[in-house]
Amino acid sequence: MGWLFDAENWSGATGIPVRLLEHLAYTWLTLLIAAVIAVPLGAYVGHTGRGGFLIVGLTNGLRALPTMAVLILVVLWAGIGDLPVYTALVLLAIPPIMAGTYAGIRAVEPATVDAARGVGMRERAVLLQVELPNSLPLVFGGFRSAALQVVATATIAAYVGAGGLGRYVFDGLAFQEYDQMLGGAVLVAVLAVLVDLVFVGLQRLTVSPGLRPVGTGGKS
Amino acid sequence: MTWIFENWDKFLELTAVHLRLAVVPVLIGLVISIPLGWVASRSRVASAVLLPLSNILYTIPSLAMIVIMPALIGSKILDEINVVIPLAIYTVALLIRGISDALRAVPGHVVAAATAMGFRPLRRFITVEFPLAVPVTIAGLRVAMVSNISMVSIGALVGLGGYGQLFIEGYQSNQDKVWAGLIATIVLALIADTLLQVAGRVLTPWVRAGR
């Protein structure tokens, strides 16, 4: 564990803070792109009820998809760079977010939705002001499991030349510096737990107290 | 895809390793999570410790866990146990909450009836209480099995076998190998999932009897 506490590893262009920020940048931008795609789709399908089987089938099927193969195929197709990393990560993050949004909207009490229509809300307002806020616990569940998978997979992305904390794992492996490899792995584990905690906190802050929730899980 | 048919022996060998690395942890995880789930269903303290702990362990990425194992248990980098233990931990994490909830949901009068019929606690657990938790257990096992089958590949990054090896080799030489590994993984996951689903039906005939 000496590597982790060596001051030398905490500074410079390949120091732990830089790698940590790279890792967080991958995670954050991936979640943002995935959210822009997945939330409207999930909300639309959840609201209209059309195509629900597609979302359920897609999420179950994708659980079996080996992330590494996806990553390698995109690299072979597009070359090394940011594109394969984000393509693979976004593909991973979309299903849980979409499924969470879809399930969240489907789980809103029909009586509540009826009441919203009854007081004269248009469909758009029903979706934005009633269904989405009420579905937040499950939407957050989706984001949490997406974030975990992205943090985990961003590590693997270092195998195809990406930055982030995975660098230490693969560089350590390549140069047989197991101390560095172990240090990198510990950092990833700690980061994953912290990111999960941040989402739990966000959930507490934004979800209406009337809807105290439990999150759903997913794993990469 | 043609790679599979041209290298049938190697493919079967990789399949055997992949299956072993995916199935053994699920079995170990199942055996561990039944008593743990029972303890968590009985004691508030145990469930307050076990459930959050399993959540945290589940959060740790598989690659990190595989890499940390040697330092933790003193194994060599290339020991299969480095993959088996993390995947077993994930399986426990997936199963324990469901099992403990299901055991807690067994109606009191059912337990009382079994006791009145002279069932001792162990026999009552095996023949009455646990069977009622089987549907939840099977649901958890299906998730664990499928995600384990896809996660085993990660082990190849540190030199452990299975279809993941095809990804590594394919990355350096040919794309066909990557596709072969990808498709084989998905097919294996589908087969395992179907088998578990069938097992669930066979084990719980009473679920359909009422219809």
Image (spheres, grey):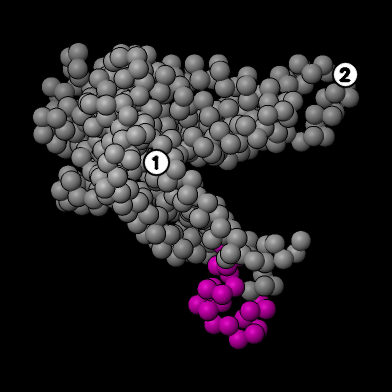
Quarter assignment of residue B162: top left
Chain for numbered disc 2: A
Q: Is residue B17 above or below residue A84?
A: below
Question: Of residues B113 and B170, which is closer to you in this image?
Answer: B170
Q: Is residue B45 visible?
A: no
**Residue A70 rendering spot, x and y as whole percentages:** 38, 27
Looking at the rendering, the stretch of residues picked out in magenta corresponds to: B112-134
Question: Which three-letter amino acid code belongs to the residue tagged 1?
Answer: Thr
Q: Residue at x 76, y 16 (%)?
A: A124
Query: To which residue does mark 2 refer?
Result: A120
- Which chain is disc 1 placed on? B
Query: Same subunit under labels 1 and 2?
Result: no
SS class, disc 2: loop
Instruction: Give the image location of residue B180, x and y in percent.
Output: 35, 35
Residue at 43% over, 35% down? A65
At 35% across and 51% down in the image, what residue appears?
B19
| Callout 1 secondary element | helix
**Vertical side of B155 occupied by A102: above or below:** above
Q: Which residue is mark 1?
A: B185
Residue most extreme to the bottom: B118
Badge number at residue B70? none
